[in-house]
Image (cartoon, rainbow, N blue to C red):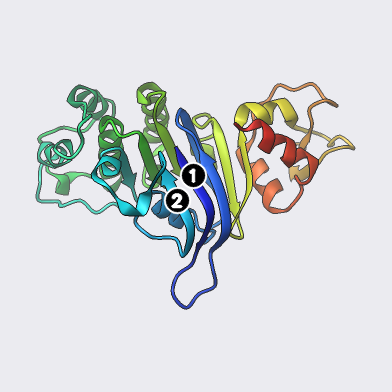
């Protein structure tokens, strides 16, 4: 659905952020985009949304350049940036009506259910909503829009623990198989049991792209008093060590620990054959 072909991009008077970047994301996925602060996660999403234009190469959605921002593309795109700016003089229902006019597939019944799930009253003024409630309102609109490409940048910032749980539940319940949802975040635990593919961005390069199912088949994410001798990555833990080891050596069972995986990838501990095998399995 989204394809980056040899993309170069950088901001004026700064070194290139991306050089020769290739990436393909297919519909039917919830993708977690992980990277350190300043790694370019938000810029990558802005390229997907067609808000900035590559210096070289192309970013395509269904074969068309995103920067062209054709009406048919915009009808299928909803981008929620990290910092949401909402006109606070409007009521929730008035704000929603603006969005519903822009999306041919907007589902008012789904929105009604999502607002109930998020405990947001349609007659409330936006000025009376907390920052977290405003974020939840945007998420509800996004999932109700009918758009096939959903881009959420740090969607759980400002959400309390119950709201983060509700976020995971509503995304799982309301996402269609023909949609692609990309979630950029540094709060890895918030999406650990939601995403089915992870992309790690570091130093302007895609260091890892893999389905969680492939990760489970390839690695054991465990902890114990000592780490296995063949561990690819280890870190200290209150109970001893946490580790990532090849699955063929140890019985699997635990789901991938994204925080540990991320740290292992950016430290270069998972390289060579292991990542090559994963990249072949990801599609």
Secondary element at tag 2 = strand
Residue at position x 57%, y 54% in the image: 21
10 Å crowding of disc 2: few (<14), some (14-19), many (20+)? many
Q: Is residue 198 above or below residue 65?
A: above
Total labels: the figure holds 2
For the residues bearing labels 1 and 2, Cβ distance under 8 angstroms: yes
Could you say where residue 106 lies in the image, as x and y percent from the top left? Answer: 21, 30
Would you identify the image quadrant in which residue 122 lies? top left
Could you say where residue 32 lies in the image, as x and y percent from the top left? Answer: 51, 40
Depth check: give the residue in front, 3 or 93.
3
Residue wearing tag 1: 3
Q: Is residue 109 visible?
A: yes
Residue 59, numbered label: 2
Residue 67, numbered label: none
Would you identify the image quadrant in which residue 54 lies? bottom left
Would you identify the image quadrant in which residue 159 lies? top left
Task: State how far apart marks 1 and 2 are (Cα).
Answer: 6 Å
Residue at position x 78%, y 43% in the image: 234
Q: Is residue 238 visible?
A: no
Q: Quadrant of the N terminus?
A: top left
Could you say where residue 153 lies in the image, as x and y percent from the top left? Answer: 40, 48
Residue at position x 10%, y 46% in the image: 90
Depth check: give the residue in front, 143 or 122.
143
10 Å crowding of disc 1: few (<14), some (14-19), many (20+)? many
Q: Is residue 244 left or right of residue 146?
A: right
Q: Quadrant of the C terminus?
A: top right
Could you say where residue 236 lies in the image, as x and y percent from the top left? Answer: 76, 45
């Amino acid at each position: 659905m989204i394809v980056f072909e040899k993309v170069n991009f950088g901001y004026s008077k700064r070194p290139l952020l991306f050089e020769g970047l290739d990436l393909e994301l297919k519909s039917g996925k919830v993708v977690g985009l992980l990277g350190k602060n300043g790694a370019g996660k938000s810029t990558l999403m802005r390229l997907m949304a067609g808000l900035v234009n590559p210096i070289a190469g192309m970013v395509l959605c269904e074969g068309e350049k995103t920067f062209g921002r054709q009406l048919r593309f915009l009808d299928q795109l909803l981008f929620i940036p990290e910092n949401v700016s909402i006109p606070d003089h409007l009521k929730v229902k008035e704000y929603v009506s603006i969005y519903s006019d822009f999306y041919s597939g907007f589902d008012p019944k789904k929105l009604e259910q999502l607002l109930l799930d998020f405990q947001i009253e349609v007659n409330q003024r936006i000025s009376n909503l907390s920052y977290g409630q405003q974020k939840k309102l945007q998420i509800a609109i996004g999932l109700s829009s009918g758009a096939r490409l959903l881009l959420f940048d740090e969607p759980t910032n400002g959400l309390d623990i119950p709201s983060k749980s509700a976020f995971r539940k509503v995304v799982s319940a309301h996402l269609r198989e023909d949609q692609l949802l990309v979630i950029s975040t540094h709060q890895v635990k918030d999406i650990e049991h939601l995403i089915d593919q992870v992309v790690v961005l570091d130093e302007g390069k895609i260091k890892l792209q893999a389905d969680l199912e492939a990760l489970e088949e390839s690695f054991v994410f465990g902890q114990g008093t000592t780490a296995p001798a063949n561990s690819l990555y280890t870190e200290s833990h209150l109970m001893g060590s946490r580790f990532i080891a090849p699955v063929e050596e140890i019985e699997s069972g635990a789901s991938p620990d994204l925080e540990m995986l991320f740290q292992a990838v950016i430290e270069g501990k998972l390289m060579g054959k292991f990542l090559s095998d994963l990249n072949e399995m990801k599609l």
